[in-house]
């Protein structure tokens, strides 16, 4: 927060005065968004693991409900969608919560994207090799 003219303003949005109606209305949204954003990858992993251990991933009912989450991945990487969601969550944390300096945010984001590219190139999680190549190219572009 910044203190200007005897008023507090948000660092991320200097036009937003703190402790006003508009500011207070955003607090419950943020309070819900953070836990939900953290819970989605965990719930996804739980549901996939439950169905994996029950050997029901191939059943029509499971495919209809959850097939989009895991069908495009190799068997060893069924949880890759959760890894993707966690990567997005970590990137948001880097950009919003952890660092105030724009230069540090950019540097940390670049390192994060390079690590993500390395992880993807090592894992090659998709069944279709063309999708693996496309993902590698897109991650390389983000790193530039």
Image: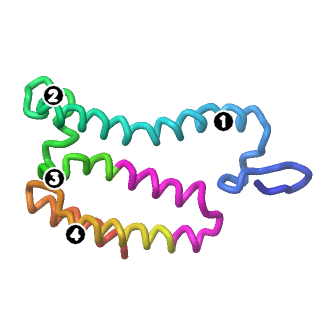
Q: Is residue 31 placed above or below 116 in the rendered structure?
A: above
Kindly identify the residue that appears in the image at 36 percent across and 72 percent down.
114
Kindly identify the residue that appears in the image at 13 percent across and 34 percent down.
57
Kindly identify the residue that appears in the image at 53 percent across and 40 percent down.
34
Residue 121 is tagged as 4
Residue 76 is tagged as 3
**Earlier along the polypeptide chain: callout 1 or callout 4?**
1
Q: Nearer the viewer, residue 85 or 52?
A: 52
Q: Nearer the viewer, residue 143 or 46?
A: 46
Instruction: Say which quarter of the image contains residue 140.
Output: bottom left
**At which x and y percent is residue 78?**
19, 47
Q: Which residues are magenta?
A: 85-106
Secondary structure character of the magenta stretch overall: helix
Residue 62 is tagged as 2
What crowding class fits label 2: few (fewer than 14 Cα within 10 Å), some (14-19), or many (20 or more)? Answer: few
What crowding class fits label 1: few (fewer than 14 Cα within 10 Å), some (14-19), or many (20 or more)? Answer: few
* Residue highlighted by disc 1: 27
What color scheme is it? rainbow
**Earlier along the polypeptide chain: callout 4 or callout 3?**
3
Judge left or right: residue 45 versus residue 53.
Answer: right
Q: Is residue 90 placed above or below 137 in the rendered structure?
A: above
What crowding class fits label 4: few (fewer than 14 Cα within 10 Å), some (14-19), or many (20 or more)? Answer: some
């Amino acid at each position: 927060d910044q203190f200007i003219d005897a008023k507090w303003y948000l660092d991320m949005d200097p036009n937003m005065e703190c402790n006003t109606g508009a500011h207070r209305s955003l607090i419950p949204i943020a309070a819900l968004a953070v836990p939900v954003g953290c819970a989605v990858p965990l719930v996804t992993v739980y549901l996939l693991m439950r169905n994996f251990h029950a050997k029901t991933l191939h059943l029509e009912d499971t495919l209809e409900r959850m097939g989009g989450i895991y069908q495009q991945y190799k068997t060893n990487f069924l949880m890759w969608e959760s890894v993707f969601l966690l990567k997005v969550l970590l990137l948001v944390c880097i950009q919003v919560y952890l660092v105030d300096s724009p230069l540090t945010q950019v540097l940390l984001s670049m390192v994060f994207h390079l690590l993500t590219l390395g992880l993807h190139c090592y894992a090659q999680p998709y069944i279709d090799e063309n999708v693996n190549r496309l993902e590698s190219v897109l991650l390389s572009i983000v790193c530039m």
